[in-house]
Image (cartoon, coloured by chain):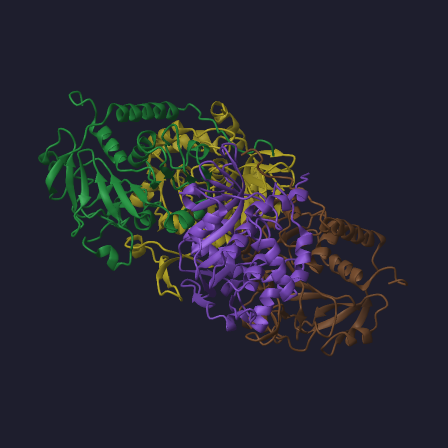
Chain colours: A green, B brown, C purple, D yellow
Amino acid sequence: MSELGFTPDEMMTIAASRALKGDDVCFVGIGAPSAACNVARLTHAPEITLIYESGTIGTAPDVLPLSIGDGELCDTAVTTVSVPEMFRYWLQGGRISIGFLGAAQLDKFGNINTTVIGDYAHPKTRLPGGGGAPEIATSSREIYITMAQSKRGMVDKIDFYTSFGHGDGGDHRQRLGIDTKGPTLLVTDLAIWKPDPDTKEFTVVSLHPGVTRDVVQESCGWTVKFADTLEETPEPTELELKTLRDLKARTDAAHKGEAVGAKRGSKDG
Amino acid sequence: MSELGFTPDEMMTIAASRALKGDDVCFVGIGAPSAACNVARLTHAPEITLIYESGTIGTAPDVLPLSIGDGELCDTAVTTVSVPEMFRYWLQGGRISIGFLGAAQLDKFGNINTTVIGDYAHPKTRLPGGGGAPEIATSSREIYITMAQSKRGMVDKIDFYTSFGHGDGGDHRQRLGIDTKGPTLLVTDLAIWKPDPDTKEFTVVSLHPGVTRDVVQESCGWTVKFADTLEETPEPTELELKTLRDLKARTDAAHKGEAVGAKRGSKDG
Amino acid sequence: MAKFLPLSQAVADNLNDGDTVAFEGFTHLIPTAAAHEAIRQGFKDLTLVRMTPDLIYDQMIGMGMAKKAIFSYAGNPGVGLLRRLRDAVENGFPHALEIEEHSHAAMANAYEAGAAGLPCAIFRGYRGAELARVNPNIRSVTCPFTGEVLAAVPSVRPDVTFIHAQKANRKGDVLVEGIIGIQKEAALAARRAVVTVEEVVDNFDDLHPNLTVLPNWSVTAISVVPGGAHPSYAHGYYARDNASYLEWDEIAADRDRFREWMQENVIEKSADDFAARVEHLRNVA
Amino acid sequence: MAKFLPLSQAVADNLNDGDTVAFEGFTHLIPTAAAHEAIRQGFKDLTLVRMTPDLIYDQMIGMGMAKKAIFSYAGNPGVGLLRRLRDAVENGFPHALEIEEHSHAAMANAYEAGAAGLPCAIFRGYRGAELARVNPNIRSVTCPFTGEVLAAVPSVRPDVTFIHAQKANRKGDVLVEGIIGIQKEAALAARRAVVTVEEVVDNFDDLHPNLTVLPNWSVTAISVVPGGAHPSYAHGYYARDNASYLEWDEIAADRDRFREWMQENVIEKSADDFAARVEHLRNVA
């Protein structure tokens, strides 16, 4: 970090944020996706619509939520709907342009496991499960994934198909009758990946500043494909870095217990 | 009317209102049912819950609505929900104790036609259709019907089964898998009718004051069954009559175009 | 993303001959101004969808614009029958009208399924009801857990839905309140949603978070038409003009009187004429 | 008709060993006080239903009260895993736990279908997802109009649902606002609905007509428990105690420390202790 002036994690969040556009309607997973989406909103895409599965539509939190249902999300939303409505009208209804997910385990075709490590019936590690992801993965028009690289996380074969990416690759989605694009972007702390147009295997298209092919391969459980012409991800700008760091600082302060007041509601009933 | 001090129509409304209890949750059809339900609310059953299919739950209108969605219903309701929610959570959910319906054509088993006179494809008279009635008739725990008698209205065979009553009688409902009671009461301008416990044929159990068996038969298209012990419907009380007439007077004034102001809403947005 | 347009342009841009269109409103907030604009522009072969076709569909049918009507209650609410619709169904005047008739429960579920992006809706309905015999779009599905046979209807997915709402903010978000009916579902079920509003306000900052708001990116076009729901009403703005509903029963009873009334009150008028029609109904409590 | 009862009585009257029970709350308004009361009363063999089982189900499972869990996301939101639930699933401690696992979309639809009195819900889901292989309650239905195969799950119909809400009025009508989650559906899907509230107000006359209100006749019992959602929050009353969620991760990591914490903070406490826990979170903007 010292020589570059930013951490790999910051580079990941900022690179992910750059993929979002102002007219996107983004279904935001918690953690890294939430930071990236809000950095986009606070920098180049102020008009972006962020949706959290708790029912908050068009939210603009001043601090990152710890959960997907923090009060801040409701306070700043255009409207807040029930959870059934969220999954029926807004996700299943086809209104989400980008579903933004993290992953505990990921394979090279963008299939995600957040359910178990080991056998489902007798797991080595019981993870939280899919939550909204199984349907986010197939109902959003496309899927962006962001995660820090590790051999434990990026594996040749995931233990459980929580959310379907490109399956075995190629036209597997179409063969299952799924007409959305699936994973079109993976941003890690080391690189930007896009699926090969034919095989759908994630391929590195851009290395973050200072990152080599070897470093990428060392922290990935499958044999990495690299694009013929490999770009270098532009460094974070001063604005991007400041925005992200300010956001994280506000967030840390808030999560240490400072109450964020509820701004709207019926106090008159 | 002059000798009795009330009209048959008033007797009908008041007799119907008496069947309702304070703990009933009543899905109110427009017209005669609406008047009866509100007279009940304004006399012996102030706690009754009145629901109109426009989504107004627990409404207490000061004037009778002309339509099922007048602003007065929303202004005075405990809550107002969407129409899909009304039909899914509140009606289909099994929360309605009494569905209160009118009818254009009725047969002796409580089957109702409000769709067509004549053949469906080439009707002699195209009526408005079922609206909420087909599911009110089967999802409400029981059904009360109220209508003024006439040979055109009370017929041996209805032209179209808009809403199912007891079908061909007996256990026809159970045979169709319908586990609600269906029509348990018919109040006309001349008499009170209840279904025979076995055949389910509507049987006159009480004649309104001054009404004879012959009068009932003359205005009914089927051969009328009378109970062995026939009661006389108690005359309207002074309170009942005054309540009904005041309600009608307020209603007439309002429908002549005096605006009933909208009381609640967001004026601040 | 919602565009603010004059109503004439919003209608011209979004409605086409042959479209399946819903002008929705459940007694409250009926988009009369939008329907009248569609009448003035003279569209043809429309499939008109609405739970409660009332005056505006009676008018469109009477003007010969409709090929088919999909509905659940075709009455003049609280008054009686729709006489132009009757004339079309009973006498084929001005031409024959195909009808697809449902119950309210079915239509509400069909809009809900449309908003939810599903091909059909299932519900417990039509038991013993004869519509299931005459409407081939009433089918059934068997619950794979209990074996119960449930009714199924196709979802409603209009090409375009027109609704009227209380207000938009400058960004184009739209608020509907009071008897919200089926408006949200009708708008979200459609490929294009056009909204007429009573007014535009700066922002919705002080709105309660759980109100019925359509975000600007779920709306195609917004036109400001004060009084645009008349003779229906807009909760918080003006009351229902019950007298006009009663009067309609007489106007529509006669083919010539109907044409004259339409000429005078629709064809020769514009969206700007609605505001004056509700002036006497604005004395809010 | 809603009865106002002390929480201990509301729980004793409405929860039984062996019941299928939902303590619902989607991050917001989690009915912690009701869950703690159920723990104190020592119920057994419960089937616990919830989209997002978090601390309170971790606690109930750790105390050996649960036979089965039906859920879609078993995590400590924003923090990590549920360590007591993991211990039950991975090691059978304190005893084995049967699980029926769904996605959020499935659970939300299942509650909705339960509230709607249907035996099952259909939706476009689980495509390519492996849960459909391991959960026999994920089946399918074919659309009778398009032939599309849709996912089907049984509706959720708990014996009793507990929710926390902002307020009741004196008649027993209940208001839920802010992130309303799945509360209305969970309450209406259940045979009995018990609500804890922050406060009781005279009436709801000034409430907007379209807010989420459960009429008194749809509620079984109401208990007034200020702070009863802690460490979750109550929109308009107090903020989320994020520090407590972070702390739970350490408490639940160790079996002994968990038992000690439960003894001290649940078994030896009562519903009256919740108000003090949220005092420092009340500095509303």
D176 displayed left or right of A89: right
Q: Position of residue D279 (x, y in %)?
A: 50, 24
D139 displayed left or right of D269: left
The residue sitting at the right extreme is B3
Q: Position of residue B159 (x, y in %)?
A: 62, 75
**Is D226 above or below relative to D96?**
above
Residue drawn at x 41%, y 45% is D51
Q: Quadrant of residue B226?
A: bottom right
C194 displayed left or right of B149: left
- In depth, the one of C57 and C274 nearer the eye is C274
Task: Using the rendered image of the protein, determine whether residue B181 is visible from the camera's viewpoint.
Answer: no
Task: Using the rendered image of the protein, determine whether residue C77 is visible from the camera's viewpoint.
Answer: yes
- In depth, the one of C277 and D253 nearer the eye is C277
Q: Quadrant of residue A131?
A: top left
- In depth, the one of A82 and C281 nearer the eye is C281
Q: Position of residue B46 (x, y in %)?
A: 72, 48
Tally of numbered discs: 0
Q: Position of residue C264 (x, y in %)?
A: 61, 55
B206 displayed left or right of B169: right
Residue drawn at x 56%, y 62% is B135
**Is A60 above or below relative to B126?**
above
